[in-house]
Amino acid sequence: LHCVRERDQRLVKLKKAAVLKRHGMLACEICGFVFARTYGKRGADFIECHHILPLSALGAVLKTKLDDLVLLCANCHRMIHVARPWLTIAELRRVIDAARSDA
Ligand SMILES: [Zn+2]
Ligand SMILES: [Zn+2]
């Protein structure tokens, strides 16, 4: 279900358009990665969409709002889902900060 919602392409499109309009680019909300900077035209429109509400909070009729979606690079998105429990955005930020300060 989580993935089905994340694959609602209409909403994802709206989210990306809203962020593009406001920030002029699509950046990962955790690490700041911008696909266009690394992959040029090929990555210009690419970023993944993650739904931040836990499944238990989602009723069948509850509509996903744009604010419930965060834009993430493929790495951060994968790291959120790599093991249960899934991390929140803030938790993954802390994981990155901790790893960087260890390095
Ligand atoms: Zn990222
Ligand atoms: Zn996700």
Image (spheres, helix red, strand yellow):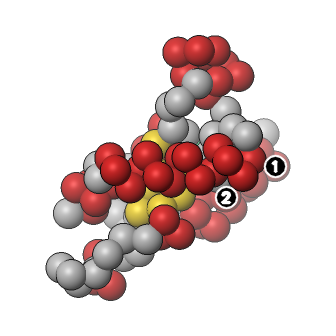
- The percent position of residue 28, horizontal first and vertical second, equals 63, 45
Task: Please name the residue shown 51% across and 54% down the image.
Answer: 15
- Nearer the camera: disc 1 or disc 2: 2
Kind of element beneath mark 1: helix
Mark 1 nearby-residue class (10 Å; few <14, some 14–19, many ≥20): few
Provide the residue designation for mark 2: 93
Q: Going 41% across and 50% down the picture, which residue do you hit?
A: 12
The response on whether ligand 1 sits within 8 Å of label 2 is no
Q: Earlier in the sequence, mark 1 or mark 2?
A: 2
Spatial CA span between label 1 and label 2: 12 Å
Amino acid residing under circle 2:
Arg
Residue assigned mark 1: 101
Which quadrant is home to the C terminus? Answer: top right
Residue 94 on image: x %, y %? 68, 62
The image position of residue 85, as x and y in percent, is: 38, 68
Whether residue 41 is visible to the viewer of this picture, yes or no, is yes
Q: Quadrant of residue 92?
A: bottom right
